[in-house]
Amino acid sequence: MDRIRSTDDKKGAAESSIELICCPECKSTTVVEDTTRGERVCGGCGLVLSDHRIDTGAEWRAFSTEESDSRSRVGAPLRYTVHDKGLSTVIDWRDRDTSGKKLSPTRRSEIYRLRKWQIRSRVHSSMDRNLAQAMSELERLSSQLGIPEPIRELAALLYRKSIIKKLVRGRSIEAMVAATLYAACRIREKPRPLDEVADASRIDRKKLGQCYRLLLRNLAIKIPLSNPVAYISRFASQLELSSPVQLRTVEILQRSRDIGLTIGRDPLGLAAAAIYVASIMLDERRTQREIAEVARVTEVTVRNRYKEIVKKLSIDSMGLEPIEH
C-alpha cells in the first residue's frame, strides 16, 4: 500500500480519530479518516490502512442549522414505547392544510375517511391491539412511579420480546407490563420495591412476582445483585434527611459489605437499618415506623438489622471510624 508523504492536499477533509485500530507498521492507534478520498490513514507513519470507503453522510451541504433542518429527510427516532414504534402516519384533527387554512367541505369529508381508515390500519392485528394497550399502561405506570425514559424504553423492549415468546397469552397485560418495568429498573440498577410497583399497577404482589420469574426464565435476563446503596437517595429524600446522613448511611453499608453482613439479607431492610443508624448518629432522628413505611418493610426487620449493624461494626455513641481507602 502507498504511503502519504504530504498533508497539504487533505485540507478541508473531515478528520476524526478512530480508537481500537492498530497500524501494522508502527503499531500506532491514531487513525485519521479522510472522507474526501475515502481512505483511513495511520496518523503516525502515514500508511493507508483502507481505501474506497463508502461515505455514509448526506449528499447535500448546509451552512446553518435552519438550512440543515429544512433539508433533513429523517423523522423522529424509533421509540419502543409507541406500539408502532412511531413509524405510522398521523392525520391531524384540526382540518387545516399546511398553511393553516381551513379545508373545504368536500376535502374535509375526504380527510375524515382517510383518518378513519388510517386509525383502523394502525391497530389491525391482535398483537397491535395488545401492544397499544400495554404501551398505554406502561406510560401510566411509569409516570406514577417517576421512571425515566431510558428505563421505559427497556421495559417496552422486554414486553415486545415477551410477546414474541408468547408469554403474554393467557396472562394479564397489566401484570406483564409491571413485571417488565420492575425488571428494567433492576437491570439499570435503579430498583423499586416490588410492593411499590404492585400498588401502582393495582396487581397482586404474588401475581407480579410470578410474572417476573416467568420473564427471568424465558428471556434469559441477567439481573445484577441488588445493592442497598441504590435505595438510599430515594428513602432519604422521602424522610427529608440531609446529605451528611446519606453519606454516613453509604459508609455504614460499605463497611457492612466488607465484613459480609449484607450476604443473604434483604437490601431494603439493610438500607432502612443503615438510615436509622445514621440518623441517630447525626442527630436527625426518625422513628423505626417512619423508616419502615418508606422502605416498605416491617419494624421488626429494621430492628433486627439495626442490632446486627451496631453489634458487628461496634458502633457506639461516638460514631463510626473513617473508612480506610
Image (cartoon, rainbow, N blue to C red):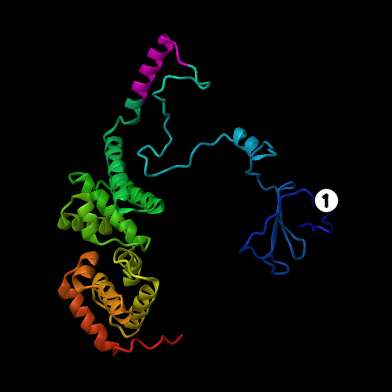
Q: Is residue 179 above or below residue 71?
A: below
Q: What kind of residue is marked 1?
A: Asp
- In percent of the image, x 27 and y 44: which residue is there? 137
Q: Is residue 62 left or right of residue 100?
A: right
Residue 248, position in %: x, y?
A: 36, 78
Residue 10, position in %: x, y?
A: 79, 51
Q: Is residue 107 magenta?
A: yes
- Name the residue that disc number 1 marks: 9
Task: Work out whether residue 197 can be spotted.
Answer: yes
Q: Is residue 241 above or below residue 85?
A: below
For the residue carrying disc 1, how many other residues have a C-alpha within 10 Å: few (<14), some (14-19), or many (20+)?
A: few
Residue range in magenta is 102-118
Residue 210: quadrant of the picture: bottom left
Q: Is residue 177 left or right of residue 97?
A: left
Residue situated in front as seen by the camera: 124 or 109: 109
Q: Is residue 10 above or below residue 252?
A: above
Residue situated in front as seen by the camera: 41 or 281: 281
Determine the secondary structure under disc 1. helix
Q: Is residue 233 magenta?
A: no
- In percent of the image, x 33 and y 58: which residue is there? 185
- In percent of the image, x 49 and y 19: which residue is there? 97
